[in-house]
Amino acid sequence: MDSRPLGTGGRLVVVGGGASATAVLHQLARHVDVRPDSVTVVDPRPAGFGVAFGTADPRLRCNTSVDVTSLRRARQSDLLRYLAARGWPVSRSDFVPRALVGQYCRERFTEARRTLAARGCALRQVTARVDTVRPATRPGQGYLVTLNDGHILEATDVVVAVGGDQPRLPEELRDHADHPELLVGPYPSGRLRALPEDARPLVLGSKLSAIDAALVLGASRRRVTLCSPSGELPAVRDRLCRPARAAGLLAGLRTLDPGSSHFDLAVTKLLVRAVRDASPRPSPALGRQFGTEPEALQRLGTELRQTETGANAWQLVIAELIEAVNDWTQGWPCRDRDRLLARFRPLIARHISAIPVSSARILAQHGLAGRLVVRRGNPTSLAPAPGGGWHAQWRPEGAAEHYTHVVAAAGYRPPAVCSHGPALLAFGTAACSPHCAPPPTDARLRLTPPDGGGPERIWMVGAAGGARTAIVNYLWTAAAQADVVAENLAAR
């Protein structure tokens, strides 16, 4: 492939235009010697927003604090600087509306475009989707990026920054995907707000997407039911910041042998010690920092009170835990890493994906008012009702319950990106089976084809970089990846 660095020319194609892509462009523009011939962003949605931050609903807040919700890794959060310069009275620990972060990303995208334009580089967006990335016809001439509208882009360098934008739809609903009273995913939230005030929706899911649906739907007289196999809601926190005092989690993890019979106990002890060391004052024993009630809304109330009284020191190590797990497992085979994470998912998943205390208060109020119900288990059958709405059968012997609408809010599918067949990369569910592994990358996040060639001048970041990074749905992680990619693109 053409080894000429982007800093001395070249044509960069960025697949995806959300926060991860914006982080790459924002950091690339900071390299004063970078003067590419062209930069083309390919995304059908407005650049700078994406699914995560594309909402305009003020009820929907980030579940990460301003401190780590930044497009650039720096001593002070770039988002904090951005908001402070515009008069927003926020601190590093605050959870802000996702719409603010979307606007921040959009403005940083526009700034990167202006900076590159001043150097003679035109940054443009193509509102399409990428089908494949293939080697150019002549060896050493870069890549051909084919789009779903039939156009082909020539590139010397490619950054793949697509996220998971396809909501998970249960198999029993796939034949009804076009049903007018089925909402596939909670976004855009305007579809939820448009439901009648007396609607009685069933939300499939109880994690972050479902929480967003409940916050929007419960704002009126609607009675909302959430359901999932676990019947669990996320934990509650009032901050997710970089730790004031590092607890040495990464150093501790590196001393452990995952094959040891005492491994699970050793990890648990390491976490307990990290929480104790990170706490600025004596805190309750770790076992007394979580709700234990089997009923989800009761547990939510307990954990809300614990957060409001400062009795949840576990939240002080979450950012460090994410960093430690990502660094420790970097380069592991995906199967080994996923097997390890599955072992500890019951211990840490609710806390890594905890919700802001303000959102928890609203949910608790909905529960007390009878507007929110959380059920363990999914319906045994779910089908359109003859007169409209849906019939849900919860037990084979029980009577069917009627719901006016169903909202599929059980999260999103991983990015459909494959690295097999004649193309270096193929995009889309038609080309990528559910069993495909994420495209392999090296330590610099460059694609390494399965045939042993490469590495290519193709970089995988954000959710698309899941082959090397365990926890990718975290902007602070994407910012670190963007720094690696920008440095490589700018390297002479």
Image: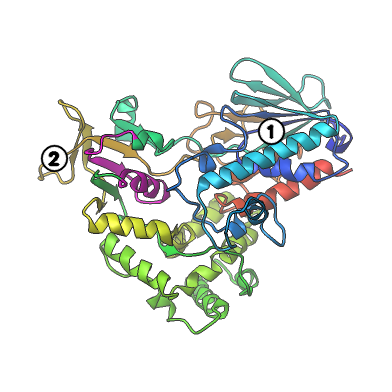
Q: In which quadrant of the rendered view does residue 431 lie?
A: top right
Percent position of residue 351, x then y: 45, 62
Asked where in the image residue 43 lies, by quadrant, the reply is: top right
**Residue 400 badge:** 2
Instruction: Give how far across and how far down residue 478 sits, in percent.
Output: 64, 49
Q: Is residue 395 left or right of residue 433?
A: left
- The percent position of residue 233, horizontal first and vertical second, equals 35, 57
Residue 356 on the magenta segment: no
SS type, badge 2: loop
Query: Which residue ends up furthest to the front in the rendered image?
Result: 87
| Residue 261 visible within the image | no
Crowding at dot 2, Cα within 10 Å, few <14 / some 14-19 / many 20+, comes out as some
Q: Which stretch did the figure color magenta?
A: 194-219
Q: Quadrant of the N terminus?
A: top right
Report the residue at 42% width, 50% height from top. Answer: 208
Under circle 1, the secondary element is strand
Return the disc, 1 or 2, that comes first in the chain's sequence: 1
In the displayed structure, 25 sits above or below 237; it is: above
Nearer to us in this view, 376 or 353: 353
Tally the marks. Answer: 2
Q: Give me the C-alpha separation between circle 1 and circle 2.
A: 49 Å
Where residue 189 sits: x, y (%)? 41, 38
| 10 Å crowding of disc 1: few (<14), some (14-19), many (20+) | many
Name the residue rendered at 62%, 27% in the picture: 421
Marker disc for residue 370: none
Q: How is the image coloured?
A: rainbow
Q: Would residue 216 be counted in the magenta stretch? A: yes
Badge 1 is on which residue?
A: 14
